[in-house]
Image (cartoon, rainbow, N blue to C red):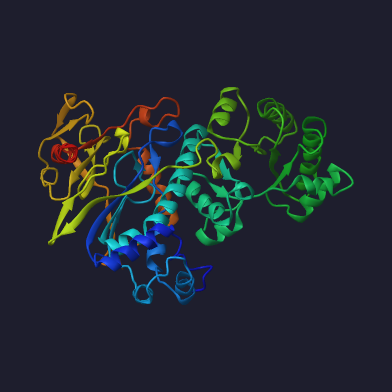
Amino acid sequence: MDGANNLTLHTDKYQINMMYAHWINGTDGEGAVFEAFFRKLPFGNGYAVFAGLERIVEFIRHLKFGEEELAYLAKQEENYDPGFLEVLRQFRFKGTVHAVEEGSLVFPNEPIVRVEGTIFETQLVETALLNFMNYQTLIATKASRIKQVASGDILLEFGTRRAQEADAAVWGARAAYIAGFHATSNMHAGMMFGIPTKGTHAHSWVQGHESEEEAFLAYAKALPDGVTLLVDTYDTLRSGVPNAIKTARYLESIGKRLGGIRLDSGDLAYLSKEARKMLDAAGLQDAKIVASNDLDETLIFNLKAQGARIDTWGVGTQLITAADQPSLGGVYKLTARKCDGQYIPVIKISGNPEKVSAPGKKDVYRIMNRSTGLAEADYMTLHEETDILNGERIKLFDPVHPYIHRFISDYEAVPLLKPIVVDGEIVYKLPPLEEIRSYHEHQLSLFRPEILRKLNPDLYPVHLSEQAWQLKTDLIKAHQQ
């Protein structure tokens, strides 16, 4: 692999420096458990949608320090010992990774990815893992919010030109597709992932002809199947829609139908309603109306409330940049380290209470209520606990106000963390994108609509087991003495 394609150094420098310090001190082989999670739901939403696992797996699969990477490290101001560089030359990831499956609904403070191995290798993967998880989960969540308000309409991802570089455009399109978008304008994403691609034409096509009518006709002759015409270059209702209707007559003469029109400016509610009347009066009831222009879930929600006659929504900037919250804020925290063959739980204590970590190697279960078939809560246990595996009665309590609690016994505990990589070998078969998309759709059906709603969603509970909560309490007390 050349340097441009090798992502092994897609990391922060302090990771390399910590790896070096461990190597110098002879602690590079000590065991460690890290957990990746986020503390707060984005966009004020009631849930997040996990995405990014495929990229994480491919990153781990190809982790290797090539000669370009080693030569670059040899030039750093730290003057790394040549022996360290030789260790990196031989490096391969031999750790174990568990993760939630892509398309899953996930919630704050629960492990989404758990990495276990030597401190040397678990430290190396942190930055890239968070980069992939944070961005793709953010975009998938934003896309799912838009999907929730679109009420069965067609959704097109149009964000490439406003994305933060090529990778963001391509992987953002994939994340949006997982969450329910129907197509992308990005041809590279379509080729890489098999996502359907859609597109109309630009204003420049119209400007580049003597008249709008001529431009529409030329386009229809070139691409007569499924023609959608951009009607707002000059005047949407006085020229754009009438010229689109004229073009529809030509298409009918050759046995074709006008696919639709696209609105990209102005009052989309008013223009869509008036355009619909004109198209229907011309016998073009099957012609669709596509809208674009800085759309997001709030604008789409409001346009639908105003009776807008829009069938397809092209969403770009606000989706691909997650404009109202451009970062998920996921973190990767050490929860246990191995001493004398045993994992010892560790905790991070902060002046901000919400940043105090939950210690210990943990598993996460989704508690499904057998009587309703719906998710009741997510439940985090220490890895060695067996109560939940045996179906015993468990206590669900508020970790801030423990006196608020309830017991549940008629449940199914669904483990969320699946084995992805075991001792360096990838054991998880990455599912096709269509399967991930269907899985996400099914996931939504497992939660109460009050949790899924756009505005003021109900809080979905995430609980620590009594043992995990007690461990956290004990470690806080131990470090405060």
Image location (x, y in percent) of residue 362: 21, 48
Indicate the position of residue 480 as horizontal and vertical percent values.
19, 37
The image position of residue 161, as x and y in percent, is: 64, 49
> Residue pushed farthest top?
306
For residue 415, side relative to residue 271 (left or right) = left
Q: Is residue 243 visible?
A: yes
Compared to residue 76, the image places residue 298 above or below, namely: above
The answer to whether residue 427 of the structure is visible from this angle is: no
Taking depth in this image into account, of 41 and 377 the one nearest to the observer is 41
Looking at the image, which is closer to me, 320 or 149?
A: 320
Image location (x, y in percent) of residue 325: 50, 37
Query: Which residue does the image show at 60% across and 27% down from the upper left?
Result: 303
Q: Please report the residue visible at 20 percent of the width from the left and 32 percent of the height from the top.
A: 371
Q: Where the C terminus falls, by quadrant?
A: top left
Q: How many marks?
A: 0
Q: Nearer the viewer, residue 215 or 164?
A: 164
Q: Quadrant of residue 357?
A: top left
Q: Hey, which quadrant is residue 374 in on the image?
A: top left
* Image side of residue 355 versus residue 56, left or right: left
Question: Going 31% across and 38% down the picture, which residue do you hit?
Answer: 355
Question: Residue 153, relative to residue 453: is it above or below?
Answer: below
**Left or right: 113, with 389 as reference point:** right
Query: Along the horizontal axis of the image, is 443 left or right of 185?
Result: left
